[in-house]
Amino acid sequence: MNRDSKHPHSLHVTALALCLPLCASLYSSAGAVTVHSLDQVRGAIKSPEGRATFDQQINGAPLPDGFGTQLPQGFTKEMLLAQLAPGQDPKRLTLAGAKPWPQQPQAYVAIVCLATSPDQAKAELRYDPSSCSGDDITPHDVWLGVYTRDPQGKPRLVARTEAPVDTPVDWGDTNIDTPQSIGNNPQTGAAEGVPQNWLRFDFAAYRLHGQDYAFGVRAGWSEGYAGGGATFEALYLFQMDDTKLHVVFAQPMMYTKMLAGEWHKDGTRDHIETDASNVLSVLKGTSHGFHDLRLQQRSGKWHRVFRWSAKQQRYAVVKNS
């Protein structure tokens, strides 16, 4: 049996009739690549994030422990829930994790993820013992915190989000395709939305000012088509402000789409693939004491510069950058 016949409905398949009106628009953009079997799709994906997603969804590669659910010494799920999301129902908890923060010695970044109801959490945990993956109807509430250790080595909470993260990702000015589920801000008309899935910590060296660093969290969306699907990824940056954590950046970072095409006589099948990914760099220049950021397409010309907005207390895109 060939690889295509093993995977006739890859990547969250929906009925073919649902896809047919969308197929032309999904792959009308420049850069689409047609390969002649599923085995060749991975080689057509340009971004490492896209290839990793393909390996997990198609080749069955294990998911990495992106949030550190194998907790460091002294951390427990019960402690993280009580301290990061006080008063919340423990039966809603689907994930609790913590990892060392490389840029801040002796510090840890922690997360708890809660389903919308105990029944939803029970259903998810039946298939995955530690999950923060939802959809547009059943999203998750996410709280984050930063810990150090006291002189006795016990974890000590020093900063946290005051409420579940609800900052939307802005698709108003990006080279990354927009998920179908993303809506528009009723006041500004801008395309924006909150994630379906929370994926992993991103501990690249995002130095904002002086020796103060932000930490990143990767979040995403997914959608299914007949014989294929799409994955989208965004980056959130969190800044410590005394005892509080704030979102200071939330932008699309990656997408990859795959659609199955015509069958061949030998049992293989065409697949049409498109993808793009970005890299965020910290620049030497500063605005209001904060380093400027440059979002650059990997192996492409598209880029944008972001500068600190004293009014918004977060990064804002520089027009015509």
Image (cartoon, rainbow, N blue to C red):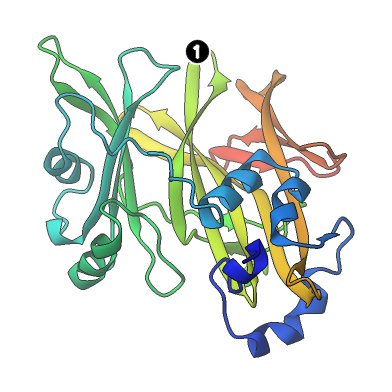
The residue shown at (75%, 62%) is: 37
Give the residue type at disc 1. Answer: Gln
Compared with residue 220, is residue 161 higher up or lower down, i.e. above or below?
A: above
- Residue that label 1 marks: 211
The residue shown at (47%, 62%) is: 196
Rendering coords of residue 255 (x, y %): 67, 54
State left or right for residue 197 relative to residue 2. left
Residue situated furthest left in the rendering: 152
Residue situated furthest top in the rendering: 151
Residue 123 image-quadrant placement:
bottom left
Residue 8 image-quadrant placement:
bottom right
Label 1: how many Cα within 10 Å (few below 14, some 14–19, many 20+): few
Looking at the figure, which quarter contains the C terminus? top right
State left or right for residue 281 relative to residue 198. right
Rendering coords of residue 209 (x, y %): 55, 19
Residue sitting nearer the eye, 80 or 283: 80
User: Helix, strand or loop at disc 1?
Assistant: loop
The residue shown at (46%, 71%) is: 136
Residue situated furthest bottom in the rendering: 17
Residue sitting nearer the eye, 174 or 118: 118
State left or right for residue 249 relative to residue 82. right
Residue 185 appears anywhere in the view: no
Rendering coords of residue 256 (x, y %): 68, 55
